[in-house]
Image (cartoon, rainbow, N blue to C red):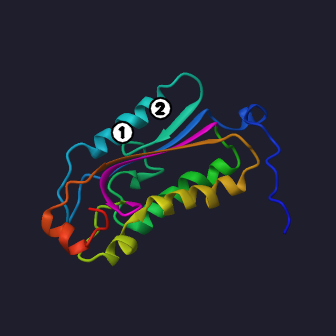
Amino acid sequence: MPLPKAKTESWGEALSRGPWVEALCIGVDAYEHLKILNNAVGDASAIAHGIQDLPGMSRAVGPETPAEMPRCKNPANKVALQTLLKQFMAPLVRAPPKIVMVFFAGHGIWDGDNMYLVPAKADLRMHSDLQEQCLSHHELFGLLKTELEDKIHVKDVLFLVILDMCQNLSADLKKRLRLHGD
């Protein structure tokens, strides 16, 4: 079996190609089947504005960013979350930053060794709905690896994932989902 291809370029050599920080800040407040949240979209917007205000070159896409990525606010379903992540990462392959950050604020569900990011229209009635309708942190990390890390030739990009997840599920929903370790 051949060895993996070595990353040949340091970030310092690639500096002219990309900004210091590229951040995707997702906020979900408007849940259809779970408790509506008051501050998740605002939190994601505040993080995006904070990244943009960093000294040097930094960019952030957030809920209030103009039209190029409108689904940062209340993505409807798992496919919308996956698509948003892929759209965010695609241009980074050509111009990798020093830091790639993903911030998610919204409902989250912890089940055993999985954390699930819950999109706005998730209708969770049984345990299998978690995998079908929500994005696990394992899937998120897998997308970061396959859509970005495996495609770039810079060896020292830092990936930062911040999950600001509200876990105030009703007792009835916890019972129906049969969560592991709850």
| Image quadrant containing the C terminus | bottom left
Is 135 displayed left or right of 123 in the figure? right
Q: Name the residue type under label 1.
A: Ser
Give the residue drawn at x 29%, y 40%.
Answer: 42
Q: Kindly give the residue lying farthest to the front in the view shown.
A: 181
What is the x, y in percent for residue 47?
40, 35
Q: Residues within 10 Å of mark 1 (few under 14, many from 20)?
A: many
What is the x, y in percent for residue 28?
30, 53
Is 155 displayed left or right of 63 in the figure? right
Residue under pointer 1: 45
Is 57 displayed left or right of 39 in the figure? right
Give the residue drawn at x 70%, y 40%.
Answer: 156
What is the x, y in percent for residue 12?
75, 31
The prevailing secondary structure element of the residues shown in magenta is: strand
Magenta run includes residue 100: yes
| Image quadrant containing the N terminus | bottom right
How many numbered marks have been drawn onto this rendered protein structure? 2
Label 2 close to label 1 by CB (< 8 Å): no
The disc placed on residue 51 is 2
Q: Is residue 83 visible?
A: no
Give the residue drawn at x 50%, y 63%.
Answer: 139
Instruction: Determine which quarter of the picture holds residue 4.
Output: bottom right
Q: Is residue 89 visible?
A: yes
Nearest the eye: 28 or 167: 167
Magenta highlight range: 98-115
Give the residue drawn at x 79%, y 33%.
Answer: 13
Nearest the eye: 139 or 175: 175
Instruction: Determine which quarter of the picture holds residue 20.
Output: top right
Q: Kindly give the residue lying farthest to the top in the view shown.
A: 55
